[in-house]
Amino acid sequence: MTTIHYTFTPPAVPSLAVQGSEQRFPVNRIFCVGRNYHAHAIEMGRPVDKAAGRPFYFIKTPSALVESGATVPYPCGTENYHYEMELVVAIGAPGFRVKEEDAASLIYGYAAGLDMTRRDLQLVAREQGRPWDLGKDFEKSAVCSPIVPIAGLGVIASGALTLQVNGTQRQSADINQLIWSIPELLADLSQFYHLQPGDLIYTGTPEGVGAVQTGDVITGHVARVGDVTLTIGAAE
Ligand code: MN
C-alpha cells in the first residue's frame, strides 16, 4: 500500500457522536432545506405554494460543523445573528433517484440541529440575487446534537420541535408541519445528488427565528431525538 505524503497534515474528518455507540458518524456533506414550514416562509416574506414549486437547498461546508454544547464566538461580519431550530436527517446508505417509499432505507438516524445564520448578509444576498454563502455557510454555523439511530423511530413524520433562548420559548412547532416531508425531501434531493453515507440534511426551521447576542444560551429540542445547545461567546 502506497503511503500518501500530504504537503501539510489534513484537517480531521468532521464527525458526530452516536447515541449508544463508541463509534462516531463521519460527516460528508451538509444539505439544508430552505422554507420548509409555511409560517416561517411567510415571516421571511416568501410564502410557499407547494403545488407550484419544489424544495430548494443550500449547502454548508462540513468544516462548519460544531457539536452541541459548544460555545462559539459571535461571528464576524454580522449584526443580526439568528438561530434556526431544525430536525436533521443523517444518511447511512447511498441513494440516487430514490423513491419516496424507499427513503427509510437511506436513513441512519436523526439529530437536533441549529442552522445558525448571518441574517443580514443572507437577506442582502437574497435581494441582490446572489448566493447565500456569506449568510449561511460560515465557520461554526452548523450545530448538531449526537445522532440517534433510526431503530425504533422509523421515518419521523410528527413530534414537537422547540427552541428556547435563555429559557424563554421562541420556536414551537411540529414535524408534521413540514411542507416537504422527509421521504419527499430524500426523493427530490436524490434527483440532483448521489446521496452518500455521512450526508446530513437540515430539514428547515419553523417560525419564530430571531437574533441572539453574546452571553445567550440556546436550547433546542426535538421529540424522541434530543437536545441541542449552544452558548454565544464574545466576538473575536
Ligand atoms: Mn434553516
Image (cartoon, rainbow, N blue to C red):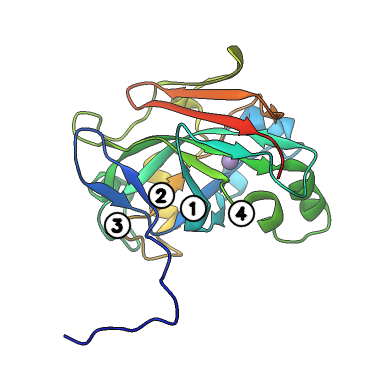
Q: Nearer the viewer, residue 64 or 73?
A: 73
**Mark 3 sits near ligand 1, with its Cβ under 8 Å away:** no
Per the model, the C-alpha gap separating discs 4 and 1 is 11 Å
Q: What residue lies at 59% left-to-right and 52% top-to-bottom? A: 139
Residue linked to disc 1: 31
Upstream in sequence: badge 2 or badge 1: 1
Which circle's residue, 4 or 3, is located before the other in the chain? Answer: 4
* Helix, strand or loop for disc 1: strand
Which image quadrant: the C terminus? top right
Q: Which residue is mark 4?
A: 137
Q: Is residue 48 left or right of residue 219?
A: right
Q: Amino acid at mark 3?
A: Pro
Callout in the foreground (4, 1): 4
CB-based contact (under 8 Å), mark 4 and mark 1: no
- Residue 202, numbered circle: none
In-image side of 14 versus 202 (left or right):
left
The residue labelled by disc 2 is 200
If the picture is divided into quarters, which one holds ligand 1? top right
Q: Identify the disc placed on residue 197.
A: 3
For this orientation, the residue located farthest to the bottom is 2
- Is residue 124 toward the left or the right of residue 102 in the image? right
Q: Amino acid at mark 4?
A: Asp
How far separated are the C-alphas under marks 2 and 3?
9 Å
Q: Residues within 10 Å of mark 4 (few under 14, many from 20)?
A: many
